[in-house]
Image (spheres, coloured by chain):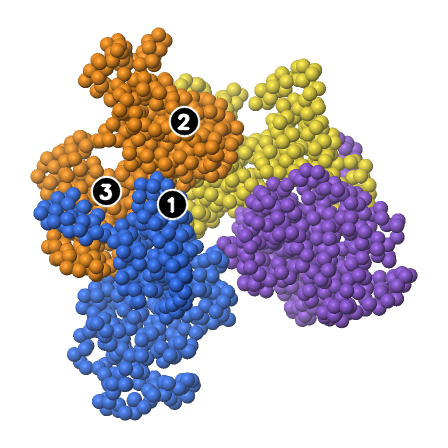
Chain colours: A blue, B orange, C yellow, D purple
Amino acid sequence: MEASFLKRLVRSVVHPSERIRAARRARHAIELCHALLSERGEVSGAALAREALTAFRELSDAARAAYFDLLVSEFSPDPRRIAAAFEAYRSQPSSPEHLLRLQQEVEPPRQEVFRRINMAPGGTTALLAMRRHVLEGLASRPGWKVIDADLAHLFSSWFNRGFLTLQRIDWRTSAIVLEKLIQYEAVHEITGWNDLRRRLEADRRCFAFFHPALPDEPLIFIEVALTKGIASTVQPLLDLGSPVVDPRTADTAIFYSISNCQEGLRGISFGNLLIKHVAQQLGQEFPRLRNFATLSPLPGFRSWLRGVLDQGGLAAAPDGRELTEALGNLERTGWFEDAGLAERLQAALVPLCAYYLLHARKNGEARDPVARFHLGNGARLERINWLADRSKRGMDQSAGLMVNYVYRLDEVEENHEVYVKEHRVVASHQLRKLARECPLFSPAEEKRAETRAPAEEDPRWR
Amino acid sequence: MEASFLKRLVRSVVHPSERIRAARRARHAIELCHALLSERGEVSGAALAREALTAFRELSDAARAAYFDLLVSEFSPDPRRIAAAFEAYRSQPSSPEHLLRLQQEVEPPRQEVFRRINMAPGGTTALLAMRRHVLEGLASRPGWKVIDADLAHLFSSWFNRGFLTLQRIDWRTSAIVLEKLIQYEAVHEITGWNDLRRRLEADRRCFAFFHPALPDEPLIFIEVALTKGIASTVQPLLDLGSPVVDPRTADTAIFYSISNCQEGLRGISFGNLLIKHVAQQLGQEFPRLRNFATLSPLPGFRSWLRGVLDQGGLAAAPDGRELTEALGNLERTGWFEDAGLAERLQAALVPLCAYYLLHARKNGEARDPVARFHLGNGARLERINWLADRSKRGMDQSAGLMVNYVYRLDEVEENHEVYVKEHRVVASHQLRKLARECPLFSPAEEKRAETRAPAEEDPRWR
Amino acid sequence: MEASFLKRLVRSVVHPSERIRAARRARHAIELCHALLSERGEVSGAALAREALTAFRELSDAARAAYFDLLVSEFSPDPRRIAAAFEAYRSQPSSPEHLLRLQQEVEPPRQEVFRRINMAPGGTTALLAMRRHVLEGLASRPGWKVIDADLAHLFSSWFNRGFLTLQRIDWRTSAIVLEKLIQYEAVHEITGWNDLRRRLEADRRCFAFFHPALPDEPLIFIEVALTKGIASTVQPLLDLGSPVVDPRTADTAIFYSISNCQEGLRGISFGNLLIKHVAQQLGQEFPRLRNFATLSPLPGFRSWLRGVLDQGGLAAAPDGRELTEALGNLERTGWFEDAGLAERLQAALVPLCAYYLLHARKNGEARDPVARFHLGNGARLERINWLADRSKRGMDQSAGLMVNYVYRLDEVEENHEVYVKEHRVVASHQLRKLARECPLFSPAEEKRAETRAPAEEDPRWR
Amino acid sequence: MEASFLKRLVRSVVHPSERIRAARRARHAIELCHALLSERGEVSGAALAREALTAFRELSDAARAAYFDLLVSEFSPDPRRIAAAFEAYRSQPSSPEHLLRLQQEVEPPRQEVFRRINMAPGGTTALLAMRRHVLEGLASRPGWKVIDADLAHLFSSWFNRGFLTLQRIDWRTSAIVLEKLIQYEAVHEITGWNDLRRRLEADRRCFAFFHPALPDEPLIFIEVALTKGIASTVQPLLDLGSPVVDPRTADTAIFYSISNCQEGLRGISFGNLLIKHVAQQLGQEFPRLRNFATLSPLPGFRSWLRGVLDQGGLAAAPDGRELTEALGNLERTGWFEDAGLAERLQAALVPLCAYYLLHARKNGEARDPVARFHLGNGARLERINWLADRSKRGMDQSAGLMVNYVYRLDEVEENHEVYVKEHRVVASHQLRKLARECPLFSPAEEKRAETRAPAEEDPRWR
């Protein structure tokens, strides 16, 4: 994406006349931002905001880059004023006035510009787009970081959970929202309206967070299958032709996909809240539900494994040579159709996968990003599923392995603390046992894992 | 209000055991705030927020005061960390990271506490109540100013115009909202449901701003009468028995009452936005409307006049003595029923009132608070109305005088600038002439007033 | 009402010129009805319907009477065409065409006029008003009976239960609906908005049926109190100052008022449906509810008793003379404040009341209209309550007595059949015993009563 | 459809055991209908209705046929009772009671059964399905005509225009409604969601009538294109890739498709109402619209032409032989790509088409069904368009010809009357001239056509 952005940028500034025009446009749009902060902005707020918004929206790629540069250079705080305010504060730190003045001086005037642009119809949407553009260009323009920070600060305040609504999405939802699901689904692609429809039938649920200012834009959505028992393969859940079952007979809710929709809200997390709210809502609608589990990908497993093999990590193992050789077969497509080979690979891969989930680290944290997300939310690692995702993507990322994370109301808080404070992974006995069988395992690592016996009584998600 | 608050406070802390209990309660509620900022707060956000919210809500007056004290002492920024961040920033002001760190250090942790409390159902309502309590106690506890500032900062971001909806209020509106109008009306008291109903008939309009998180709570509302010609007395507009006229025959919209509803949003202004949005909406619904004017009180007129008289301000006037004597009659109730007296007083009061509106100042600004509001919005002073409000309140505040401010789409921006930058008051010829007739007038003051001829073409509020 | 209608009628036709004008107006409106049935009506349906509607609405009382007369004389079926259609039908009764033709010929063209008027905005409302006027005048113009029948026929089809929605009414409901409750409440007057508000608090429920074409008009509504135990007096339920209790602690739903709202729908019954739907809805919301009972007036008791006394009905009783004398005290207001007298009267009245409910008849049916309604719905008579309604109306109608009817899901069908087919009253043991103690009782009457033991298991209203 | 129904019927009754089972099922469902009319039906209305509904829904094809037979034989009126009621009526035709009794006796008890079934949730939907089944079987079971008539009678009362709502359908509409459009579109097939989406863009409009009891089921819908000038070919309107134009620049609304959705409502017409309501609504939204026209198919043209040719209708014409020969080319696919041939055919076909529209008759009415519909609504024939629909269907039905009917507010009433009373066709000068050029034309036919000059002033659809 970055590449194409740069390409577009380069292309568009090739002619000097073009560059001059872009600069003029950017200057015009920036002047409107200055006006917004002036007296005039005070009284004709909405009208001027609309103008400033339109000017921004119509900027070409090149002009937008110039605009962002000006936002950095002309709307940042004044170091001298900050210094003065700091000196006053230092002389009397307990004075509310001094602290307030310091706070005001360090807040970039940009933030007020953004707050005023937000007053125009469509303002919030435009500001989300602005941050998307800033993030896109950040690698080549690190100075834009301050714009990003200002927008992120505003968004984390505006998109406070207290202002979001959890909405069920089904076949009664408007097409304008439904087509967004098709567009934003990031885990298991939705191939079209028929696929979408199957995912919204009686034995499926879909929920999303919405913000009142963006009624047609889901912020994040989650897809759930209501099943008997914890699903171990994903294809049946995605099968368009699968029969619809009576959801009242289900004992399990499988969270099989969760997708963020707004690039402009990157880093502002709703996922952990969404899972718990949905678990609660489902628990109320279906009192017979006993299990709330994910069926999750392991996006980093094969690349980690490749690294291990490249560094000869299995060489020291008793049968390291055969193992390494066998694992070489993963590069062949369709290897899993050879039953004998598949069996051998299962024996080798599953313990490696358990080891990967429990003990592979990156900066002290779980190496797998999906694991980080669910463990950080207080889930526990429950089960590794063999040949659970036979799609090309599933085979490429994790040799078809998937994992169930289980959410239990009585555990999430403790699990979360154990993981966040000590980076210990709460996992089932079975998974710990599998990890110990991995040739990479050393007993010292055992302390990184923990098994929690579920509480006697079973507090439900209601 | 302050008095009663103190009384309650005093009463409640009279017993040491009570004081100890209050302190314990406050400590408990504060610990939940600390927890909200901890790791635990991260994962069990909403549940913990609900707990923290409930703990706050159940505090007694004494415990709440202790709680606020702790919010000041335990959730303020750390001066040493601020100093360190400032030194880093000073050494390299252009570094985004240094600026961000400084911004983070000066932001009180309280703000994050409030953002997290907001995640609980009812959170926004509770935070508004919190600020109301803080404002109530501010006179005796000036240290709470920092809490007030933090909440005001959050609210001005959350209650951004872009998130508000303008809603028409009529007899189809829910009773839960309608009873708030009765409760919050601050200008012309609504005496009950029949009075309210008359104010929502076909020849009246009522609009309010709402925030999505407070669907049952108007933030501010405005009442409009659709009339023929600019109304000069308010009692007919408020008369329950007045016949309902066909609004399509009206040429004038009279804004006769505007009331803020949320003490917790003090200082966060929506009024100027509301008037203009309503003018636009009315202009679209009724293309025949030509005038958009207020019929406004002059809440400070008589108290200013008393000051003038007390200081012998009229002594130097040609007939100062008689004038002063005549004005003494204002203290008698019912003076206006004596036709001869009324006539004399009218001749004396109207020029004084014109002078008051155009030239009386407080800190350079117009002395009358209602005048400050409308002039700051870009309205112009149009006309003084004699015996326009014969209610007790109207007689007490302004000897029954009222004034029309006129809003014209083609003027508001310039009027606003002239007033805000130079504190010059845009007024009709007639009013300027009246002010010159006032014995207090000195020609040097003339430059404070300005008359704007309306533009040839008449851009409508649509 | 009839009287005032006649008076108005007489007054309005006193001047011949007035009579001529009324006739001309009626003729004009009737011509529009003819046009509606013509070709032109076919194509410009809605526009013409609007015209016809307006013409009807603007008729004076006299003109309306003339209009109804014309509706009878010009839009009734043609006896010769009916005769011809009948002959064809008689010759071949099995022919669908002959039957259809006969059906068409007997249907008055009025019905099609009404169906077409209904196409105009506000048509349904106007037709309800039309029937109200017809009913009002029926006594003096018996010929209008055919208009009444046509409208009743249409309404019973249009207001089919399948098209009605059951809506909860609470303080969030629009004022336009709420004021209708105040206006239409027929059992225990609502004295104003405060009274209404108490009836919509958390421990009360109010439900109404609505038709989609009349969104602001409840058709019938019921008021419920959620209590502990079956209430025996009504004043506490109506007390504005009574504390609001947590409805989740209630075990009983008391239906204390049910009111029809639309005179134009007279004879089209929704009441029995409403009670059962509400019972179901409450049973779902509050699983702890065990009893669904009314607290009902006995509007005919005292007038029946007066009749009994006037005919010397108690003369033959052992202590008939004292009894008759004691009952004479009922005419004194405030008799119940004399404890001794009240005790004596209680001993006398309660058995009489039991007898009245179980055995007093009118055309074979229960004499009390409220008893007829609830027994016909399948309720059972449960308990007589002494001094249960001390309001003037309650004392006047039934010497303060009220009665609980109980609705049990497992009984309503059988109770209904027993009552409707055999006019036997299902009542508690206690009530039957009391009735036997009444001096009027003769053993032969015993067969009119029945006691049903509730089923072992307790099928709830859910 | 009929064929397959019979086939299914035959198949299902092949085994005697099957036949017996079907009869038993039908009997069970019919008994529930009897119960609905009994006392029990009165009190447990909704519950019993639900049972009766379910029993009907679960009938097999064979059982359903048996059920319909029983509905005819057991729920028809009683000839003896009708005869008795008629005699009473004849003896005193002016007695309201006698007329009412006769009306009641001729109304089949079936109607009350249907009204009671309608009380169950989903009742209306089921009754629509019932009529669909009846219509499907009518050819082989003419006795079912009475059921059809009863349902049609009820539906024409229930689906009165006054109870319908006109709703705009766009991309914000729920998917459950949108997929019905794809399913029900009868004129120009919607090929999928992308096609649908193009038809709902800013320069298109779609409106439908809905009944409150069927919120997810459009009854009829119309598709409109907003264009500059009256469109002469349909493919550009249907082109998925066509650019979306600003609708405010349009001067013409082209009604290019109108589809009934509910087979169960056959014969209950909403189409004429829909067109006029939509014209009004569009006229309000876009004051610049000048023309409201259709672009309509001629579904009967080629089959009429074939009949003419087969009967040697053109033999007598001057160049009849060449003409006949040339027209033979229509059977070849792709003939229109041969420019010379196309030109010759155009010269031959257009006058024939004009003649067909103006003078071809069936039972005195216009022969073309679409012409009958629009002329009956008061439209006028404006223009024939050559190669206007090149789809296979368009070529098959009408050799690619299409026609514009124009709706003018000031004409529809008169046009309608002229057509309905005298079957004269209002057409443009140009079309009348073309018809005269047709070899089939005889001057005597001229009187069947009429040209109306538009009124001077132009009353808009608003």
The 10 Å Cα crowd at callout 2, few under 14, some 14 to 19, many 20 or more, is: some
Q: Mark 1 is on which residue type?
A: Leu
In three-dimensional space, the C-alpha distance between marks 3 and 1, rounded to whole angstroms, equals 34 Å
Same chain check for tags 2 and 3: yes
Mark 3 residue element: helix
Q: Is residue C153 visible?
A: no
Query: Where's residue A150, x and y in %?
Result: 28, 55
The 10 Å Cα crowd at callout 3, few under 14, some 14 to 19, many 20 or more, is: many
Q: Which residue is mark 3?
A: B130
Q: Which residue is mark 2?
A: B195
Mark 2 residue element: helix
Q: Quadrant of the C terminus of chain A?
A: bottom left
Q: Which residue is mark 1?
A: A48
Q: Is residue C24 left or right of residue B21?
A: right
Q: Are marks 2 and 3 in contact (CB under 8 Å)?
A: no
Outermost residue toward the front in this view: A17
Mark 1 residue element: helix
Q: Quadrant of the N terminus of chain A?
A: bottom left
Quadrant assignment, res D243: bottom right
Mark closer to the chain start, 2 or 3? 3
Query: Where's residue A200, x and y in %?
Result: 46, 62
Count numbered badges in the picture: 3
Q: Is residue D204 above or below residue A338?
A: above
> As rendered, which of A45 and A72 lies closer to the eye?
A72
Same chain check for tags 2 and 1: no
Quadrant assignment, res A4: bottom left
